Image (cartoon, rainbow, N blue to C red):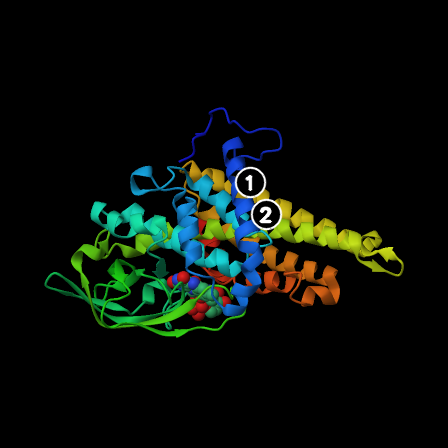
Amino acid sequence: MSENPAGAAVDAGPGIPPPFTREHEELRETVRRFVENEIAPHVDEWEDARLFPRELFDRCGELGFLGLKFPEEYGGQGGSYLHDAIWVEELSRRGASGGVAAGINAHASIAMPPVFKFGDEWQRRQWLVPGIRGEKIGALGITEPGAGSDVASIRTFARKVDGGYVVNGSKTFITNGVRADFLVCAVKTTEKGGHNGISFLVIDTDSPGYEVVTKLEKLGWHASDTGEISFTDVEVPEEHLLGDENEGFRLIMANFAWERLLMAIGAVGAMDALVDASITYANQRQAFGRNIGSFQAIRHKIAEMATTAAAAKTLTYDTLRRFDEGEPVIREVSMTKLMTQRALCEVADEALQIHGGYGYMKEYGIERALRDARLGPIGGGTDEIMKDIIGKTFGL
Ligand SMILES: Cc1cc2nc3c(=O)[nH]c(=O)nc-3n(C[C@H](O)[C@H](O)[C@H](O)COP(=O)(O)OP(=O)(O)OC[C@H]3O[C@@H](n4cnc5c(N)ncnc54)[C@H](O)[C@@H]3O)c2cc1C
């Protein structure tokens, strides 16, 4: 939780937006330098290779970035969600890529939190501690070929046997799914039971019967691996059960809130960068003997982009503050995810328009930003599902 609980004085300097403080802004500077020096120069190569090197996890672990919000006793930095938010926002600025951010965050911000939140001491030592060091890489496995939005209809089944479970089934679209060392995996543990028959197992990916069927080709997020996985009689010891049996749906939903908020924070970082890049370009590019920024149409476009980015940031930071203070924010998180992901698509599209033909080329990174942005309204719960959740919070 925040070191600035509601009502306490906030050590925010001039120009530092709540809920952040000077200390968070120092972290922002550190992360920004790291992205500029150690990620940006290599991103094109990693995108072409369709994978960033595994050593990047080690390096992020070494610098403490993978454990920002986890307690020091597990090798973390003892920070809060706000520290993680700074990391994700800066990782999503220009210079990084959606794929790099997705791969690192699927591990640090999506797969490891359930191990910390719902895991026991042994489980934390087994996966969280090496995960924070970047030695073991995690992935979150919920989606299946026949179950995306409708999580309750997953069919991967964990049959109870003496001392554990035998798992059969498949998962798809799993970020880090090709190279993960452990999969935090949603499985059915009762034949019936719908929402109530789901459990979370941590499955070591070197278990016999665990197979990466394919590495998927996709529109964006090129530097990350997205895997399809099958389980054939995979034996999983009972101490790999996270939380209580048949309580997995609740855990999945609890995890979704942070995942969706992170996607919003990433969009905020990406939009800021696209607005900056468009202003810079508009001030340099000449047409009809003038800078294109002097044309009213371009000026207005940038004004609209900047307004959208500012509105998205205000909404996101407000939801983040409330989430960090422990308020129930299902409606707000859903609204924030819905608004920011579409907003980023629009801003990226306008940035490409401002850059003209050069925007369509690789060198400015705008085409990549547009491709990467398009996953936002789909991943982590689609726009349609967000609207459904928001509507239900009004009793509709
Ligand atoms: C690159 C990538 C990375 C991903 N990473 C992961 C990961 O690491 N782990 C993981 O578990 N999953 C991951 N996903 C899966 C992602 O979360 C799902 O794609 C998403 O939840 C949507 O599910 P679906 O693709 O099966 O679409 P579907 O659920 O089949 O939806 C198809 C369309 O129908 C609409 N629809 C569905 N139900 C309703 C409804 N009730 N009302 C109105 N409209 C509806 C949807 O909104 C959508 O427009 C990833 C996906 C991609 C593409």
Q: Nearer the viewer, mark 2 or mark 1?
A: 1
Q: Position of residue 3 (x, y in %)?
A: 43, 31
* Left or right placement of residue 40 versus residue 176 in this view: right
Q: Residue furthest right?
A: 289
Which residue occupies 39% across, 55% down? 107
Residue that label 1 marks: 29
Q: Secondary structure at mark 2?
A: helix
Q: Work out whether 157 lies above or below 202.
A: below
Q: Is residue 223 above or below residue 116?
A: below
Residue at left offset 43%, top offset 38%? 324
- The crowding category of the residue bearing disc 2, from other C-alpha atoms within 10 Å (few below 14, some 14 to 19, many at least 20), is many
Amino acid type at image mark 2? Ala
Q: Is residue 267 left or right of residue 60?
A: right
**In the rendered image, which quarter is residue 347 located in?**
bottom right
Q: Is residue 194 visible?
A: no
Q: Residue furthest top?
A: 9
Q: Position of residue 137 (x, y in %)?
A: 35, 57
Work out how far the residue at label 2 is from the one at label 1, CA to CA, in angstroms: 22 Å
* Ligand 1 contact, mark 2 (Cβ < 8 Å): no
What's the residue at 47%, 26% (across, down)?
7
The quarter of the image holding the N terminus is: top left
- Packing grade of label 1 (10 A; few <14, some 14-19, many >=20) is some
Earlier residue among tags 2 and 1 = 1
Q: Which SS class for mark 1? A: helix
**How far across and down, in percent of the image, does residue 31 sit?**
52, 44
Vertical placement of 383 versus 64: above or below?
below
Residue 212 lies, with reference to residue 113, above or below; the image says below
Q: Is residue 32 left or right of residue 176?
A: right
Q: Which residue is mark 2?
A: 312
